[in-house]
Image (cartoon, coloured by chain):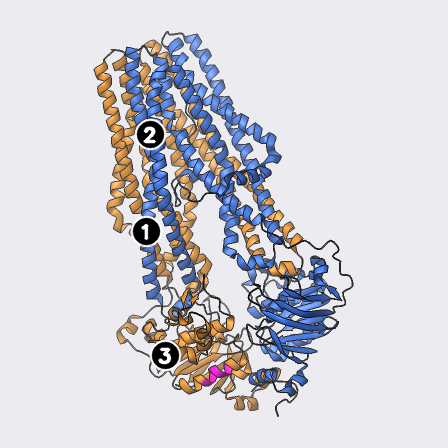
Chain colours: A blue, B orange
Amino acid sequence: MSSPPRLTPAGLPGRRGAVSVEKARDSRQVIRRLWIYLHHYTSLLALVFFLVALNTAATVGGSYLLRPIINKYILPGNWAGLTRMLFLLLGIYIAGALAAAGQSRLMVIVAQKAVRDIRTDLFSKLQGLPIRFYDTHGYGDLMSRFTNDMDNVSDSLNNSVTQILSSAITLAGILGLMLYISPLLTLVTLVIVPLMLWVAAQIIRKSKLFVMQQQVALGITDAYIEEMISGQKVVKVFSHEADALLAFDQLNNDLKEKSTKAQMYSGIMMPVIQNLNTINFALTATVGGLLAILRGLDIGGLAAFLQYSRQFGRPVNEISSQFNSLQAALASAERIFQVIDEIPEPPDAADAIELTAVKGDILLDHVTFGYNPDKIVLKDLSLHAAPGQKIAFVGASGAGKTTIASLLPRFYDIQSGTISIDQTDIKNIKRDSLRRSSAIELQDTHLFTGTVLENIRYGRLEATDEQVINAAKLVSADSFIKRLPQGYQTILESDGNNLSQGQRQLLNIARAAVADPPILILDEATSSVDSRTEENIQTGMDQLMKGRTSIVIAHRLSTVRNADEILVLEGGAIVERGNHEALLQKKGKYYALYTTQFD
Amino acid sequence: MKQFLSFFSNYKKAVIVSSILVVADVEFETVQPGLMSMIVDTGVRHKDIGYILRTGGLMIFLSLMAIAANAGNIYYSSIASVGFVTDLRKGLFAKIFRFSFSNIDHFTSASLTTRLTNDANVLQDIVMMSLRLLIRAPLMLISAVVIAIYINRDLALIIAVAIPVLGGSIFFILRRGIPLFIRMQEKMDHVNGAVQENLMNMRIVKSFVRETFEKTKFARFNDDLKKIAVSASGTVVMVMPVMMLVMNVSIVAILWFGGRKIMAGSLQVGELMSFISYITQILMSLMMLSMTIMTFSRASASSGRILEVLNASVDITDSPAAVGKNLTISRGRVEFKNVFFKYHPEAKEDVLKHITLVIESGQTVALIGATGSAKSTLVQLIPRLYDVTRGVVLIDGADIRDYTLDNLRKGIGMVLQQNELFSGTIAQNLRWGNPRATEAEMRAAARDAQADDFIEAFPDKYETQLGRGGVNVSGGQKQRLCIAMALLKNPAILLLDDSTSAVDTSTEARIRSSFRNNRKGTTIVLIAQRISSILSADKIVLLDDGAIIAEGTHHELMASSNAYQDIFYSQQPKEKVLP
């Protein structure tokens, strides 16, 4: 005779309190979007709602049966009738429990399927977004949409929807039956309940403010902790520990102050509503007792009524707390949908072509580019690389060398000029086909969790083990790989933390080698390899570049000496060009760079 | 657990008051149904309006008292739990910053951050829950049982059956459910790991056109997660229906046996009604208790991780002798005497072997050698970032373990291979070197590190914000700022671990010449890849696989060491280019 209390850990007072701070800007739109994920399961959902209604009706109705049981059977002493009624009640309760079990199970299934679909869509979307998007969106922010926001949506779908529905039906049912038993006694509840709601609203309003302040302070403290710990070795080297602790103390104390307030206000709501409900019970018992004497209220009716008044607080509490988590979930869903709604890389032009048998003729014709249109990085850049040629870019850091490596695979579109491969403007080439024609390796190495073998094979998924090993041999990576604990089967930790930077770069080059592309773009790809090893791989690199057009960006000039053309960049413009000998004879910028390096 | 208790020491009063208030609140609430039964059985039966009003008044008074007790509990439990976690965080932070490099390596920065943020917050929740629920639930259960037995001993037998049935079912469900949740967490980690990696490697994914491959890989993780989430959540949601069923069947049983008793005249209707209330209360307390315990078990991982930090022994500390002597570094002469080193005592091979090396005060000594030859390790022994395994390192003739860490590191400036800058202005960052440095000293250090020019080119110059929301400096600029930071310490010994690798060669040459001119008395130990960076060093030390294989000036080594010649020629132009 009691409505189900909800005591999952999520409903307990927590760090964030029972109060959400954020609200979706356009809740209706978000709900419509969520429905798209749920509507495949319309019939399951209908069944869930039916079961919720059945379960609630069983609970509320079961309590009402207390009235006839006491009035008609217990008090008159009708033993046979009581037995019959109790069997009926038992049947109702068993049906209710079955409905509750079914409803919870089914909702979990629907919710988890929908959440999986949302995750899939978000992930797929991220694959299609332009690099520009990743320049402007912090990686932590995107991760938090995947983790926290997705958890919020998942929890809410699991619980909130059915809980709110069942609480609403319970409230309506209880109120209806209370009125039916005694309209006069119902007045007590009707006075107390609005009071409860008012108190709840006041507390929520207050606590929202404090919870928000707490979140801000927590964010600042966490960021400080993260920064200091990740730079901890520097802190030690500079004996900065005492200062770090002092600054932390201030943040920590500020957080304490705000957190205490937030915890007080957000923690107080549930118990206060519970207590108000106790007052409701006390008042109902008193007034009910008086009514029984003065207005002839039947004892069974009073018993049922008192049951109801004990149950009243829970759905009120439930609705307000679930409503809050629903709001948080909608805000989270909105953040997820914002990413899903980002504009992807523009589709290939209708007449875009597929590159076949790429020769590797690269032409940059008066290319001007800036990440922001008003901040030009590359100015009026022209160059031609005939198939098989090696073109090198040198220049101080910040001259725009790396930018060029991002333009060829069309990570960004240029502001003016044209880039073409085999005489076709790259805007008219299908993106996938364009990118397949070249392999890029960057200074910051990127590896994936998996074996060494799998990491190299990332360059060409269908490569055989033998081809992978040959590629590794070609770039002098084979010898160190063999010395790893499990050789090629060694599992690399996320981003290859168990390897040195130089070894990671070698694996990256091997990956490019196995891809076997007509065009190679190497951006400082060997900067961390020591010079003796680099000399070893130089032969391999020369082998690798043979027959391919290659664009090489390098700091160490020894690696670019044999280039067909060397371009010296300064402030985004080419200030010198020519081969090694010609440039040295010119005694200009290149000569200066070269001689300081070997003085 | 003892370690945790010490963090409550400032909040003992709050803990005690909050616990007393819980007891009061529970008792005020538990007597309510009993009083209600008196209204029905005595007041209504005897039509005694005065009695009803008196009893009802008492009920209302007690529930008002319960509100006060409850609010007080929230107040004091918030103070205690937030205060506890504040002190805990402070203790952790202080402890973590006493860690040596090998402690840090052992834990990893990422995991230390998690322990100090998430895990500490989990403990805050747990403490709050304990203060609010852990006393309440068992107390309510016991009080209700006592009153129920007092009302009717026979009917209380139903409770004796219901408690083990419900307890057993919850135990059974959770025993199945908790391992599922642990597996779900693992699968969740897989999904998050896949996303994280994908985001970090996006350029590679795109340039190899691996979007579809990545999607397929992700779909597998995602599906695994969904499957386990359905069974984990699907199991645990069964607690509610089971609880309802047990409760409702108990109520039917009470009506059955209670009804007979009423017919026989040994029980009253009001008592029956209150009995129903009590069994509801008992079973709900039981469930609250088991849920609290479940949350506890989930938090035990967090508390375990925090204890690991608190109990970790810091392996590099000041010896009492060092504190007594209070030596400081003056000249900066460094000497290694037959030094051996390995990172883990149980490792088989030494990372550094038989290192004997003298670096005279004011000398510039360069270390070169292949990747993995332990150059960085050697340098890190000087400021005691790691302690030698055997042998001894001396500075100015004294064992470095006879200096306090603070004095030792104050005399040494160091730029790590992966040096970090911190959020704040450039000036704030540089002042890490010396908080009391004057403006002029700061600029001089920046000039010597060739950082002054680009700093002046920023609109806010030395007040330019770095890091989050500030400008991003290039790798070469960052290295120059770090060098300036170290120079500002005006150290007797300066250690540079490959700290100009991203600086272009002409700027690097200017840094070298300003060192020669303005930092004459400073002992400099540097690691470099480029041979051009070290040609002018007073001594070049060639390391191979953790051992010194040659040392001398450039010319001496060119004459005596084949290995050195190899390195030299590997970096030389193949043809003669200089006029």
SS state under label 3: loop
Q: Are marks 2 and 3 in contact (CB under 8 Å)?
A: no
Mark closer to the observer (2, 1): 2
Q: Quadrant of residue A249?
A: bottom left
The one nearer the camera, A70 or B47, is B47
In magenta, the rendered stretch is B508-513
Chain containing mark 3: B
Percent x, y for residue A72? 40, 9
Whether A510 is among the magenta residues is no
> Looking at the picture, which amino acid does disc 1 mark?
Lys
SS state under label 2: helix
Q: In the drawing, what numbered circle is on residue A256?
A: 1
Q: CA distance from mark 2 to mark 3?
A: 69 Å
Compared to residue B417, the image places residue B113 above or below, namely: above
Residue visible at 64% across and 71% down in the picture: A380
Q: CA distance from mark 2 to mark 1?
A: 32 Å
Horizontally, is B46 left or right of A213 in the view? left
The one nearer the camera, B565 or B53, is B53
Percent x, y for residue B542? 52, 82
Query: Between disc 2 and disc 1, whose residue precedes?
Result: 2
Q: Quadrant of residue A383?
A: bottom right
Instruction: Pick the quarter of the image with the C terminus of chain A.
Output: bottom right
The residue singled out by tag 3 in the image is B490
Answer few, some or many: residues within 10 Å of disc 3's Cα (few below 14, many 20 plus, some between 14 and 19).
many
